[in-house]
Amino acid sequence: MANNAREFRLRLARSTGLTDAAISAAWPEWWSDAADASPSAQAELRFSLARNLGLDPLTVLDDQAPQFIWDDSAKYKSFKGDDQRDKPAITAFGKSLVRMLVKSVEQVVSLQGVSASELRNSILKANDYVGLVELLATLWGVGVPVLHLRVYPLAAKHMSAMVASFKDRYGILLAKDSSYPASIAFYLAHEIGHIACGHVTAGSALLDMEDDEISEEKDAEEIEADRYALELLTSDPDFEVSKQGEGYNARELAAQALSLGPRMRIEPGTLALCYGYATGEWAVAQNAMKHIYANAMPAWEVVNSIASQQMAWQNLSDENAHFVKAVMGAVR
């Protein structure tokens, strides 16, 4: 075994494409320069990184090129990256993280087979509408952990969201961010749809990749998850907002959303986004957010603040807890 952690780190980055931030997040707290001289410490360093990053432990020994544990069973929606390089990194990183997250919360109810209307009605028993915070509270309540990634495995952030399964458990990782909760609520509701509709098999994963263009050629699972999300958020899988006359400016749209939303039991920001989708006037919808929400706040802060409070950290090893906190932006 080459007795040099720096050389191993460089080889790890070269062979996997992992970012320095991802490797740093996985790097154990106990490591010191003095440990470089210890073969046992070197071995434990490599096995620790393998556990955190989803690497094949047999490939981190000696001078081999580290490789991910990857069986190509994950599904990728709108993927445009390098199949051979990007898919293993994103999938192994995400599945390894979810494996840790599900240890931090007990499963109370399985979401598989739960209809959007059933879940919506359950949430509305104690809430005025279904929004980001309400979805997060529900997911943690039934035992599905949700985390927003602040550290990404690859330099180009291809993923918007991911559902991964560990045995019979599920976890959701978000990567897309916004200063307003409504758009992230839709991404989250969409991932719930993938779980409820049985799109993610046990031990596998489904990744929704970033796609700046609204595609007309979505596959059946994406259409089903979209409809599930829309019904969960609005009560109607075919919900549409029609344009009246010349439409609205941002202030007018915000006023309408704030007035109609509570009566329809739809979160006002969601209503504004539905208008943007129906009319193509996304700039108006986005500007309306400034008038709907009193204060802009990055959605990742909301997601990870709730995660930090809900996780039973004592169920994780110190190594795993440090990695999770680093990935969620709580350390370093």
Image (tube, grey):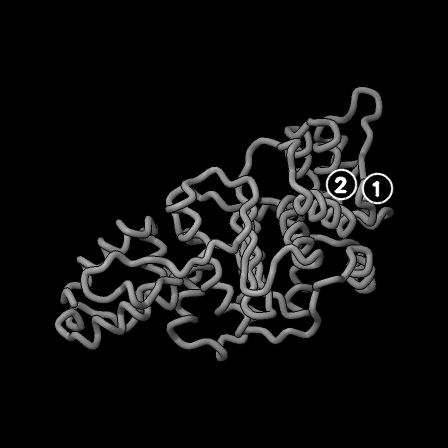
Q: Earlier in the sequence, mark 1 or mark 2?
A: 1
The label number, if any, that marks residue 260 in the structure image: 1
Q: Position of residue 29 (x, y in %)?
A: 30, 70
Q: Residue at x 32, y 52 (%)?
A: 16
* Residue of label 2: 271
Q: How many marks?
A: 2
Residue 184: tell me if it is visible.
yes
Helix, strand or loop under label 1: helix
The answer to whether residue 237 is left or right of residue 100 is right
Question: Tag 2's secondary structure?
Answer: helix
The residue at the point 15 percent across, 75 percent down is: 38
**Residues at circles 1 and 2 in contact by the CB criterion of under 8 Å:** yes
Q: Is residue 20 left or right of residue 260?
A: left
Identity of the residue drawn at 83% across and 41% down: 259
Amino acid type shown at disc 2? Leu
Type of residue at label 1? Leu
Measured as percent of width and height from the top left, residue 237 is found at 79, 45
In the orientation shown, which residue stands out farthest toward the top? 246
* Foreground of the two, 32 or 55: 55
Above or below for 238 versus 50: above
- Residue 306 seen in this snapshot: no
In percent of width and height, residue 176 lies at: 54, 46
Mark 2 surroundings within 10 Å by alpha-carbon count, few (fewer than 14), some (14 through 19), many (20 or more): many
**Mark 1 and mark 2: Cα distance apart in space:** 9 Å
Q: Residue furthest right?
A: 263
Classify 44 as above or below 323: below
